[in-house]
Amino acid sequence: MEPQSNRRLLRTLTKTLGVLTLAALLPVVVSHAHDDDKPNRHEDRFEHYEGTKTCLECHEEEAKTFFESQHYQWRGRTPDVVNTEEEQKLGKLTMINDFCTNPQGHQWIGKVKNEDGKVLGRGCSSCHAGLGKLPGDEATRDQLENIDCLMCHVSGYRRDLYKDEQDEWVWKPILWQNQEGMDIVSKRVSLPDRSMCLRCHSSSGGGPNFKRGDIEPILKDPDRDHDVHMDSDGPDMWCIDCHIDDTHTHRVIGRGVDMAATDRPEKRLTCTSGCHQDHKHQVNDLDLHMEKVACTTCHIPEFARDQETDMFRDWSQVKWNEEKKMYKYDVRFEMDVEPVYDWFNGKSFVQIPGRPVTLNDKGEVPMALPQGDRNDAEAKIYPFKLHRGNLPVLDETKWLAPVLTEKIFIEGDPEASVRKGASDLYGIENTDFTWMPTIRYMGINHSVPPADDALQCDDCHSAGGRMNWQELGYEKDPYPLPSPSEEEAE
């Protein structure tokens, strides 16, 4: 342990300089392949847009790569999940979460309206880059034409649900009956900008910033105070600058703790794996911290800084909302949330449907847990959103069951919704179940504020600091700062 005078000097330096952001010290080189992207570059490529088959005339190979991607399949191989076999395909489509639970069956597609005729939901497929069909196993022509290329490649594109000739729900552009307007919009093709990614990623879980907490709608056009990387007047980085290194394969780099499958298992995305791999601070002790502390731990002190986020959701408790004319689940929102901290080595434990649930020592069902500890050379301390919920577990099998959420909106009957959800996913009828508490760790990786807002030494290394050292595997704070009385005594 260093002398107290050195620790006092370190604290003085960090208070003067701030825990300097990586971007401030290291020139970030971003390709910005999108800088010269022409918004109307397909103006002369075709005369009339006739659906995805128009795109396939030139881009069938790209469509095949997209068909195999996470964004279309919503499931895939799971080499970074410690409690399943790699060949088993898991993902949003096949698993249960503690927000809208599971997208299969009656929750996939359809308009749910209240007594006033207002649409309350359109199904989970509203954020799927397809036109209504569930993703299949084979890249048939029918599946390729189900891909909705405009979702990710045309800014301002809008679509809605309509019935087809077979009286089935399908997604169509709202201009589908206006050929001239459709031709204008469809030729406005570009690489995916932030607004295209955010149309789904900032509104998942039922509303703006409900789910992730660190991916807020403001990221469409943020200032430096909210995000130093995506600052529209600064680096103006797009999501694809970090998450895509080959725009032709549709393979996204990176996965969250609570996301089972990954497109690029060979390439883990961290700050130091990319732009900041050779970064050095002006204070040596901070560089020592980087060996065991992730950049985001210090540089994202709070999340949900612009809009509140869902921190607790209970589908067993519903109440009638007179204003919205619907039944609503019990939910708790918070803003300016301080993360929880834990070790993470890039691998996860996830709760798998069709298997008996695993309980922690508090009797909670862990939906997703980061793996690693202080003795793990690959692990660092990361910040997380800890979401809590209440989900049904079938009494006989001890399997997690989904909830038919949109049935609750209209009928307000959680029991009937669970039984229908269990029927849709498992084919099990009329089974008894018990509501059980759940926890889910979700990585906090976005919305990096300026250096002045980064954590200081005494945020963690003082009495009442934000780190729970015992839970992190230490007997006590490994680097305690002197108390004010100790400093005065010197």
Image: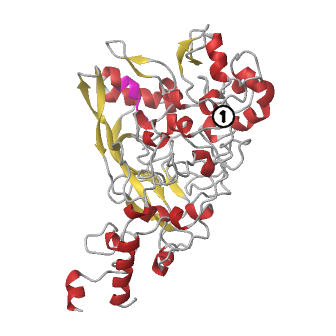
In the foreground, 251 or 183: 183
Residue at 34%, 26% in the rendered image: 408
Q: Amino acid at mark 1?
A: Ser
Residue at 80%, 28% in the rendered image: 58
| Screen quadrant of the N terminus | bottom left
Is residue 258 shown in magenta? no
Residue at 51%, 64% in the rendered image: 24
Residue interval drawn in magenta:
402-408
Q: Where is mark 1, residue-wise?
A: 190
Which image quarter: residue 300?
Answer: bottom left
Label 1's element?
A: loop
Locate residue 369 relative to residue 196 in the image: left or right: left
Tell me residue 60's x, y (percent): 78, 30
Tell me residue 174's x, y (percent): 55, 16
- What colour scheme does the image use? secondary structure
In the foreground, 247 or 267: 247
Q: Which residue sits furthest front?
A: 233
Tell me residue 166's x, y (percent): 61, 9
444 lies above or below 467: above
Tell me residue 119's x, y (percent): 40, 18
Locate residue 177 relative to residue 435 in the image: left or right: right
Mark 1 burial class by Cα count in 10 Å: few <14, some 14-19, many 20+: some
Which image quarter: residue 28?
Answer: bottom right
109 lies above or below 274: above
| Screen quadrant of the C terminus | bottom left
Q: Which residue sits furthest top?
A: 165
296 lies above or below 374: above
Is residue 405 shown in magenta? yes
Locate residue 438 relative to residue 488 in the image: left or right: right
In the foreground, 153 or 325: 153
